[in-house]
Amino acid sequence: MQQAVPDPIRISDHAINQDDLDRHALEVVTTLHENGYDAYLVGGCVRDLLCGEKPKDFDVATDATPEQVKELFRRSRLVGRRFPIAHVRFGRHIIEVSTFRQGQLENVETTDQGLILKDHVYGSIAEDAFRRDFTINALYYDIREHEIIDYVGGLEHIADKQIQFIGVPAERLAEDPVRILRAIRFAAKLDFQLDPTLADLHEDTAERLEEIPGARLFDEFLKLFLSGYGGNVWAELRETPLARSLFPSCNPDNDLVLAAMRNTDQRIADDQPVTPGFLIAVLLWEDFEFRNKRDNEAGKPEIAYEVAMDTLAIQQQHISVPRRFSIFAREVWQLQSRLEERNPRFIKRTLGHKRFRAAFDFLVLRADYDNSLKSKAIWWEEIQELDDQAQEKLISELPKKGGRRRNNRRKPRSNDFNQY
Ligand code: ATP
Ligand code: MG
């Protein structure tokens, strides 16, 4: 691909202030230098500093192999099956140290479709630059010379606010379709432009995403929607077939989802806690509700638990959602009928449920799109604020529910006992 590697541009007149560099990353680079290796800051940290953003993490690229890095740093370990890299730990903080990758794809193990399975052969900084995904992500910072090294035109694209693949987009997406999700994420985060012709590749890329392990997609899901700009990511993603390959049973036109994403961004901005479980609940709510209603109308006993498990099982085939988050989603769904029915017998128990707060937030969100829920949301908001006695009074004013037996009553089944 890059037989004759051009000389890079080296720039010392740039916006990066030495004081903004992470001291642990500097320590890693300096230690590598002291031991005779070449090493640079690279990737998102250089990009974000040039864009005036605070980097999420600092990555290092070096000519030392992962094993050599591991030997130098006591608190380090090797991770990654496709690309082994070293994680150097400083308390809760991790610096990712990757070894320059080689440029010849012949040495890389791929599927017949070109998906990279394994790449354990190393190369030069120039080769490494061309293996990165986007030009804006392939800038190296040399801490000795205070210089930015650019092989691929990344500086120009940062100035133009453009996200450009290195090489031919169709080929780079065949190697790794997750790159399209990264592109959309960076565009949303930095307010950069994506090449509009990439849209022609979305159908193919959506199909290729089906081959990506669900655990990797869950990591990407977190970055997409829990980094503080998930609303903009979803606004873009839902217009493409890519949304369906991540969440096949989510209706992309459902504005509740976009509202929840924006709400999450606001919570992050306000330093309030957020959980992926809530977003999973929102993304799959329509599917859960649809199945629940369908079963009821068909005269089958409503077993919200089982319906929830079906909805979640379909999602699991695409993104591996850790159990604690799928349980969270199920509990939020199951509490919705409690909140809607307001059966006096269950009010106190519902208020004391560990998912009450999340379920209430969800009801409030739904009430924005369903007028029939508004007065109920207000009622639950009110009752939370009251003392015990005032709560009892409010509950006593509710119409009694005892008389009518719900048609969804059913005989207990033997396997019901472990469900809650
Ligand atoms: P952020 O950390 O803010 O999400 P980042 O660009 O640093 O953004 P990382 O996942 O930390 O993203 O990766 C570090 C660098 O590794 C990237 O900047 C890019 O150069 C390279 N990289 C990461 N993932 C890929 C990929 N799928 N294909 C090619 N290069 C990649
Ligand atoms: Mg990074």
Image (cartoon, rainbow, N blue to C red):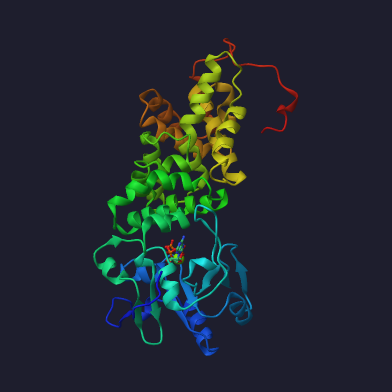
**The C terminus: image quadrant:** top right
Residue at 34% across, 54% down: 188
Q: Is residue 325 above or below residue 137?
A: above
Q: Is residue 115 left or right of residue 233?
A: right
Q: Residue 280 location, x and y as percent?
A: 50, 41
In the rendered structure, the answer to whether residue 234 lies left or right of residue 315 reads left
Q: Nearer the viewer, residue 366 or 231?
A: 231
Q: Quadrant of residue 239?
A: top left
The residue at the far top in this view is: 403
Residue 214 point in image, percent of width and height: 56, 48
The picture quadrant where one finds residue 3 is bottom left
Of 295 and 172, which appears nearest the observer?
A: 172
Q: Which percent across, then down, holds residue 327?
A: 60, 39
Q: Is residue 10 visible?
A: yes
**Residue 393 visible, this orientation:** no
Where residue 401 sits in the image (x, y, percent)?
55, 15
- Quick check: 20 above or below 145? above
> Left or right: 302 with respect to 197?
right
Image quadrant holding the N terminus, namely bottom left
Q: Nearer the viewer, residue 211 or 73?
A: 211
Q: Is residue 207 above or below residue 171?
A: above
Left or right: where 304 falls relative to 368: right
**Residue that extends furthest to the left in the rendered view of this protein:** 160
Ligand 1 in which quarter = bottom left
Number of numbered discs overlaid on the protein picture: 0
Q: Nearer the viewer, residue 391 or 145?
A: 145
